[in-house]
């Protein structure tokens, strides 16, 4: 299989058919062995029924259905795991991404790039609730991760399957794929893509997702900084605990000298508590370092995180 196209869907019943036709029209002239995977993320508007009817008439279309709504990243992960193509392209199911851009991504992959990221340079979204938060988020992600991408939130991306299948994804982590992939020294390109205004339904995103992005950004930064040296991460926190323990111990000694008749329970207790915490954290760091060095939790240069992935309820092919 040359190409897999993965499309998460959530309440996009009106968009499924024109999206499917657009993908077929864009891919058919390429002469590639391909497949299309629609992942119904617990839709309640008939999205699965429409997609299933299309799949019944096209053996190259497969539909995966979740029992409930898990979110875009788990849906994307399910599609990537089931994809059999050497190159995997992901895109949104709301018709805002243009399937006619697919050949551009394949050209970049043929040039030797491992990941190709779409840049919605003329984005057709609301200014205050979508464009401005996106600019701020992209700037922060670039500064923190050291991988400057103009549009991390664009779902239209192309990946070599060998790369994307080894990257751990959860929560809203799909927007951090270029940063995570940088751990393996991948070649990343960014190209301008078309972007259309939403035709049907309503956007599933708003300002409320910003806090998720911030939390995931902290996680990604920790992974990038300490993946190959977990002892440093634990030792840093343990050092803070040890410092607090020393300060509390010093305060306890001073208080004992100034007031020898008064028991120093508070400062002594703090010193013991934070001292014990520092020892425990340091022990965990040593254990994590041993696990990493023996390679039991390393897969082709990536840390394999254990998450509760949703189980597809039904697949139609």
Image (spheres, rainbow, N blue to C red):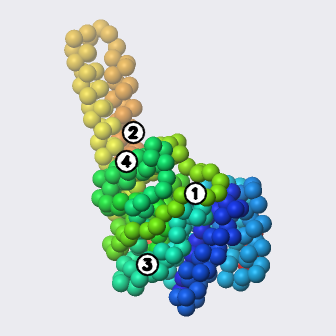
Check the picture and name the quadrant holding the N terminus.
Answer: bottom right
At horizontal 67% and vertical 83% (from top left) the residue drawn is: 60
User: Looking at the picture, how far across and down is residue 248, in whole percent?
Assistant: 29, 26
Badge 3 or badge 4: first in the primary sequence = 3
- What residue is shown with label 3? 104
Quadrant in which residue 148 is drawn: bottom left
Mark 3 to mark 4 CA distance (whole Å): 27 Å
Per the rendering, the mark at residue 43 is none
Mark 2 to mark 3 CA distance (whole Å): 54 Å
- What residue is shown with label 4? 136
Quadrant in which residue 22 is drawn: bottom right
Badge 2 or badge 1: first in the primary sequence = 1
Residue count near mark 3 (Cα–Cα under 10 Å), binned few <14, some 14–19, many ≥20: some
Which marked residue is nearer to the observer: mark 3 or mark 4?
Answer: 3
**Residue 231 versus residue 203: which sits nearer the camera?**
203
Mark 2 to mark 1 CA distance (whole Å): 52 Å
Find numbered disc 3 in the image and state the secondary structure of the residue it sits on: helix
Find numbered disc 2 in the image and state the secondary structure of the residue it sits on: helix
Mark 1 to mark 3 CA distance (whole Å): 22 Å
- What residue is shown with label 2? 277
User: Looking at the picture, how far across and down is residue 171, in whole percent?
Assistant: 53, 54
- What residue is shown with label 1? 198
Badge 4 or badge 1: first in the primary sequence = 4
At horizontal 74% and vertical 75% (from top left) the residue drawn is: 54
Q: Are discs 4 and 1 less than 8 Å apart at CB? A: no
**Where 316 sits versus 179, above or below?**
below
Mark 4 to mark 2 CA distance (whole Å): 37 Å
At horizontal 36% and vertical 31% (from top left) the residue drawn is: 272
Which marked residue is nearer to the observer: mark 1 or mark 3?
Answer: 1
Q: Total number of numbered labels? A: 4
Check the picture and name the quadrant holding the C terminus.
Answer: bottom right
């Amino acid at each position: 299989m040359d190409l897999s196209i993965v499309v998460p869907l959530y309440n996009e019943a009106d968009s499924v058919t024109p999206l499917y036709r657009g993908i077929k029209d864009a891919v058919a002239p390429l002469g590639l062995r391909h497949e299309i995977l629609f992942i119904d993320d617990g839709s309640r508007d008939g999205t699965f029924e429409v997609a299933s009817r299309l799949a019944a008439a096209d053996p190259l279309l497969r539909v995966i259905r979740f029992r409930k709504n898990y979110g875009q990243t788990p849906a994307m992960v399910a599609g990537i795991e089931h994809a059999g193509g050497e190159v995997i392209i992901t895109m949104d199911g709301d018709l805002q991404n243009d399937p006619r851009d697919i050949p551009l991504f394949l050209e970049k992959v043929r040039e030797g790039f491992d990941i190709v990221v779409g840049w919605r340079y003329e984005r057709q979204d609301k200014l205050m609730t979508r464009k401005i938060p996106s600019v701020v988020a992209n700037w922060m992600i670039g500064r923190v991760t050291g991988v400057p991408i103009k549009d991390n939130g664009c779902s239209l991306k192309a990946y070599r399957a060998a790369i994307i299948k080894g990257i751990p994804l959860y929560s809203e982590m799909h927007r951090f794929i270029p940063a995570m992939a940088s751990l393996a020294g991948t070649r990343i390109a960014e190209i301008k893509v078309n972007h259309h205004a939403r035709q049907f339904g309503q956007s599933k995103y708003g300002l409320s997702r910003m806090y998720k992005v911030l939390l995931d950004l902290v996680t990604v930064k920790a992974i990038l900084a300490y993946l190959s040296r977990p002892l440093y991460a634990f030792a840093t926190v343990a050092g803070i605990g040890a410092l607090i323990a020393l300060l509390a111990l010093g305060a306890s000694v001073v208080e004992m000298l100034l007031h020898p008749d008064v028991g120093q329970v508070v400062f002594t207790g703090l010193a013991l508590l934070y001292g014990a915490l520092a020892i425990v954290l340091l022990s965990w760091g040593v254990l994590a370092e041993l696990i990493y060095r023996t390679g039991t939790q390393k897969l082709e240069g990536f840390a394999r995180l254990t998450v509760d992935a949703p189980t597809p309820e039904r697949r139609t092919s």
